Image: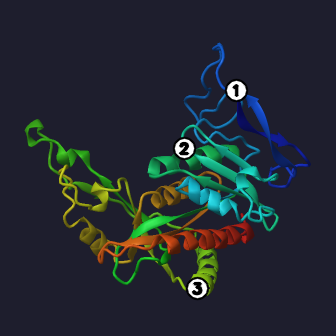
């Protein structure tokens, strides 16, 4: 039996550290066979690498990812965006020479190609702050020099004047809301009863990058599908349920009044999702520069309960993704 794997055909190295060659497909022997004496991975107290020198979870090496990254949640959205790489022209990006494609066993999907000749990677991470943390730290460890990372995802809208279908750029930064386990501990164990949710301060976005992303989105989406682009603040939750004040009779989540508390503290909040704060927080903590921005499609408006239709969502995913890729490709790294 055989499985499909990617082989790299190297050419002259590009300035950003990516090969100017192409990637091609070739069959390899199926995984399995006798065990070896090699360790599972190395550098357990740093950023672990496989024996092949790839980061452990995203499973890519230094020559397989660009310093400009658009990150999404769903693998299907990453594939959609990869369709906008140079030379794809309506083909399956997973089968186009010149586009790297890899799925890791931990749920990360990576495509690397070019946009207007500029190397760029699209990486799907799944959901949540831990997955964003894995991606940023592991990719940062194998890319030298300044980087750009932009998230393009979906979210809930927190204000009536931010209707479903709107795309919001988190130019005013992001805060986090996380469940406080001590609040749910029985009083009999002697712990105080603090607030059930912790709300952080603001992690900033890169203003110039956010403006560039917003300008490209606004121009493209208004012209092509009549969709509005807005600028505001984001809140990132550590759960889709309790920390976003959804009602679940199976659990004591104590979420009543949580959204109101968030909006009272941060009146500029427009969107709620599960990843952006981690991106912004790590970008400001990085020892090598990372310019970070984020935009999200309002799939559902929480105050009104209105939900976006699937056909429009698909169009906004594709057109908005193309606009962001263009903005990222043409924005200076330093």
Residue 136 located left or right of residue 11: left
Q: Quadrant of residue 50?
A: top right
The residue mark sitting in front, 1 or 3, is 1
For the N terminus, give its image quadrant: top right
Return the residue nearer the eye: 241 or 96: 96
Residue 202 located left or right of residue 221: left
Sequence order check, earlier mark of 1 and 2? 1
Task: Specify the farthest residue to the left.
Answer: 188
Q: Report helix, strand or loop for mark 1.
A: loop
Residue carrying label 2: 107
Q: Report helix, strand or loop for mark 3.
A: helix
User: In whole angstroms, how far apart are the C-alphas of marks 1 and 2?
Assistant: 24 Å
Return the residue nearer the eye: 109 or 253: 109
The residue mark sitting in front, 1 or 2, is 1
| Residue pictured at 40% horizontal, 80% vertical | 163
Q: Report helix, strand or loop for mark 2.
A: loop
User: In whole angstroms, how far apart are the C-alphas of marks 1 and 3?
Assistant: 50 Å
């Amino acid at each position: 039996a055989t499985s499909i794997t990617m082989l790299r055909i190297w050419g002259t190295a590009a300035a950003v550290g990516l090969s100017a060659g192409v990637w091609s497909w070739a069959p390899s022997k199926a995984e399995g066979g006798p065990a070896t004496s090699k360790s599972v991975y190395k550098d357990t107290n740093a950023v672990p690498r496989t024996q092949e020198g790839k980061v452990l979870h995203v499973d890519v090496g230094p020559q397989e990812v660009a310093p400009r990254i658009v990150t999404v949640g769903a693998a299907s959205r990453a594939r959609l965006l990869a369709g906008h790489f140079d030379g794809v022209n309506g083909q399956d990006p997973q089968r186009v020479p010149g586009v790297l494609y890899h799925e890791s066993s931990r749920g990360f999907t990576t495509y690397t190609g070019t946009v207007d000749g500029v190397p760029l990677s699209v990486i799907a991470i799944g959901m949540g702050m831990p997955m964003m943390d894995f991606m940023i730290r592991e990719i940062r460890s194998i890319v030298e020099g300044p980087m750009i990372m932009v998230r393009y995802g979906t979210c809930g809208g927190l204000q009536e004047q931010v209707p479903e279908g709107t795309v919001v750029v988190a130019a005013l930064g992001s805060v986090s809301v996380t469940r406080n386990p001590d609040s749910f501990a029985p009083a009999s164990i002697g712990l105080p009863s603090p607030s059930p949710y912790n709300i952080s301060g603001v992690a900033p976005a890169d203003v110039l990058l956010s403006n560039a992303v917003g300008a490209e989105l606004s121009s493209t989406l208004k012209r092509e599908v009549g969709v509005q682009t807005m600028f505001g603040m984001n809140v990132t939750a550590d759960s889709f349920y309790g920390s976003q004040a959804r009602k679940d009779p199976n659990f004591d989540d104590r979420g009543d009044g949580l959204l109101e508390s968030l909006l009272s503290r941060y009146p500029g909040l427009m969107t709620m999702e599960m990843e952006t704060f981690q991106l912004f927080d790590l970008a400001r903590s990085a020892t090598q520069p990372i310019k970070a921005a984020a935009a999200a499609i309002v799939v559902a408006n929480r105050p009104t309960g209105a939900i976006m239709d699937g056909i429009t969502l698909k169009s906004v995913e594709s057109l908005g993704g193309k606009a962001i890729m263009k903005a990222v490709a043409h924005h200076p790294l330093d």
